[in-house]
Image (cartoon, grey):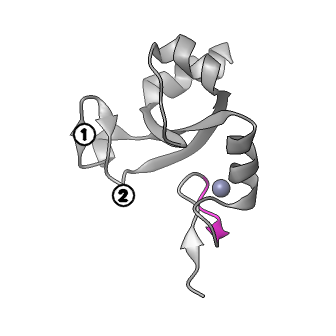
Amino acid sequence: MEKKKCPICGDECIKELCYKCNEKKDSGYIALIEVDETKSREVKKGFLVNKNAYRTGRVFHVKKEVFRRIFNRDESSNFVFIQIPVGNFLQKHL
Ligand SMILES: [Zn+2]
């Protein structure tokens, strides 16, 4: 069977997400993946859409209700890309 990579943490996985990230998702968390915008190519409306976005290695797992409070919007996917200033903000406030 072809092995996939978990889009959140990069671990090998069989399903869409790895076991650990899937557990987080089922508990109502969304993953915020920090990327370096200056080293990434494609940015759309301030959010990176490119799967090859340059990751800094920092990932934040936050409850969806917390995400809604911080970003003032809902998000249906399991993860979003954030930029470094947002990551710094989250590190201080979470
Ligand atoms: Zn994972």
Q: Does the magenta stretch include residue 84?
A: no
Judge from the rendering whether residue 75 lies leftward or rightward of residue 10; answer left or right. left
Question: Taken as a whole, is the magenta stretch helix, strand or loop?
Answer: loop
Residue 59 point in image, percent of width and height: 60, 40
From what the image shows, is residue 1 above or below residue 48?
below
Mark 1 and mark 2 lie on one chain; the one further toward the N terminus is 1
Q: Quadrant of the C terminus?
A: top right
Residue highlighted by disc 2: 52
Q: How many labels does the image show?
A: 2
State the residue at coordinates (62%, 58%).
17
For the residue pair 60 and 18, the one nearer the viewer reads as 18
State the residue at coordinates (49%, 41%).
77
Displayed quadrant of residue 85: top left
From what the image shows, is residue 67 above or below residue 33?
above
Q: Specify whether tag 2 is near ligand 1 (CB below 8 Å).
A: no
State the residue at coordinates (64%, 16%).
92
Q: Identity of the amino acid at label 2? A: Asn
Secondary element at image label 2:
loop
Residue highlighted by disc 1: 43
Q: Identity of the amino acid at label 1? A: Val
Displayed quadrant of residue 69: top right
Classify 10 Å Cα crowding around label 2: few (below 14), some (14-19), many (20 and above): few
Task: Give the CA separation, mark 1 to mark 2.
Answer: 11 Å
Classify 10 Å Cα crowding around label 1: few (below 14), some (14-19), many (20 and above): few
Q: Which segment is the magenta one? A: 9-13
Residue 16 point in image, percent of width and height: 57, 62
Residue 65 point in image, percent of width and height: 63, 19
Q: Quadrant of the N terminus?
A: bottom right
